[in-house]
Image (cartoon, rainbow, N blue to C red):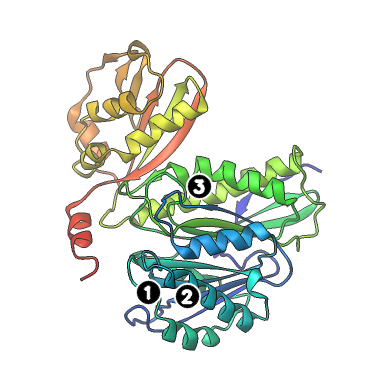
Amino acid sequence: MMSSEPEFVPDGSVTTPKGFVAGSAYAGIKTYAKDKWDLGILLSEKACATVGVYTQNKFVSPSVTLSRQNVDAGAVRGLVVSSGIANTGVGAQGMADAKETVAIAAAHAGLEPGEMIIGTTGVIGVELPMALIRSGIPNIEVGRDGGERFARAILTTDRAPKSAAVRFELGGKTVTIGGCAKGSGMIHPNMATMLVYLTTDASVERDVLSAALTDVVDDTFNMVDIDGDVSTNDMVVLFANGEAGNKPAVAGSAEARALTEALAVLCRFLCVELMRDAEGSSKIFTVRVEGARTREDARLAARAVASSTLVKAAIHGSDPNWGRAIAAVGYSGAEVDVDKVSFFINDVAIMEAGTPISFHREAVIAIMNNPEVSLTVKLGIGDGAATAWGCELTEEYVQFNSAYTT
């Protein structure tokens, strides 16, 4: 039986797939506000295949290190997260606190410490407030309706939680993938660049799950840029518990391809939501590169444009200064034949085959005043293609981050 196209589930979250529960509590790590939580737990009610992708920042949080070790050991089925403090840059105490937090959460959930991982996010250089965590974790109640609360528990400077779920047919069974994401600053394409937790009730071999996550992350979360900074704490983790009852998806199968595409649909949606929530921003832009020599060249070019501070500033000012985008393509490392490059703002041709095209400047400015703008680069030398996402650079972003810890 052929797999159906994935469809979004209304009010979907990490607990939409069968067999997942979550909850949150307020421990006092962050300043109090209504519906504001700073501790969360996500659990599968049965054993999972769990895989992850992690920050490439060498100044890595012990929380990430411990999580990676536990995931690699192959028994993880739960997650505890705290927000407000990064648990980075605090010496040996960071690993001791991460291990203690995992042990407390595992005991509360009825699991072994090796079955739990930890996510932490917030200010670097500050130790976890263990007294608050010790008293707060026992107050977390998990349930099937706890997905939205969990999504709120992972937020720091985010303006809104970001959750979704997709559902599709796989091998004659209905399969669901859910997810939530945290991130509105310190985001740059060099995985990982945010906290993202994904769940599915699909049955899938672990190596297939790992390959799917890596492939999708490369095309989605590794293609977003808010401010050019790579965080020390971030990860994307995917839990699969097999509760849908489908025949396990194996490498090279149509089911594995369908699962990967459904995961990509969900992650693309979460990417755009991350961009919409960028610190100080209300405008996002998409960079589509086509006709590159290779797929990797297309990624390089798209990321360079999305990451350019000059392009971001132009988007903020609705300035059709298209030379900034072309310059970014030129230094991206992608192969370029300048006599074949075409460039478009939305559907307006600005350059064709290396030659500038006369355009109505005021009309393009009006287009760029919209909350979403698309930039398209056609390199004309191959069939490689990729999409990246960026946001405007604003005075508000600078002001906010000039006083982040004060």
Q: Which of the 4 quarters of the picture holds residue 5?
A: top right
User: Would residue 338 be found to the left or right of residue 208 on screen?
Assistant: left
Residue type (three-letter) at the residue carrying disc 3:
Arg
Residue type (three-letter) at the residue carrying disc 2:
Asp
- Can residue 142 be spotted in the picture? yes
Q: In front of the other: label 3 or label 2?
A: 2
Residue type (three-letter) at the residue carrying disc 1:
Glu
For marks 3 and 2, the one nearer the N-term is: 2
Q: Are marks 3 and 2 in contact (CB under 8 Å)?
A: no
User: Would residue 132 be found to the left or right of residue 373 on screen?
Assistant: right
For marks 1 and 3, the one nearer the N-term is: 1
Residue behind mark 1: 127
Label 3 crowd bin: few (<14), some (14–19), many (20+), radius 10 Å = some
Q: Marks 2 and 1, how far apart in space?
A: 8 Å
Seen at 42% across and 39% down, the residue is 388
Question: Which SS class for mark 3?
Answer: helix
Q: Relative to residue 95, is residue 335 depicted above or below? A: above
Seen at 25% across and 37% down, the residue is 311
The numbered mark at residue 97 is 2
Residue behind mark 3: 268
Q: Are marks 2 and 1 in contact (CB under 8 Å)?
A: yes
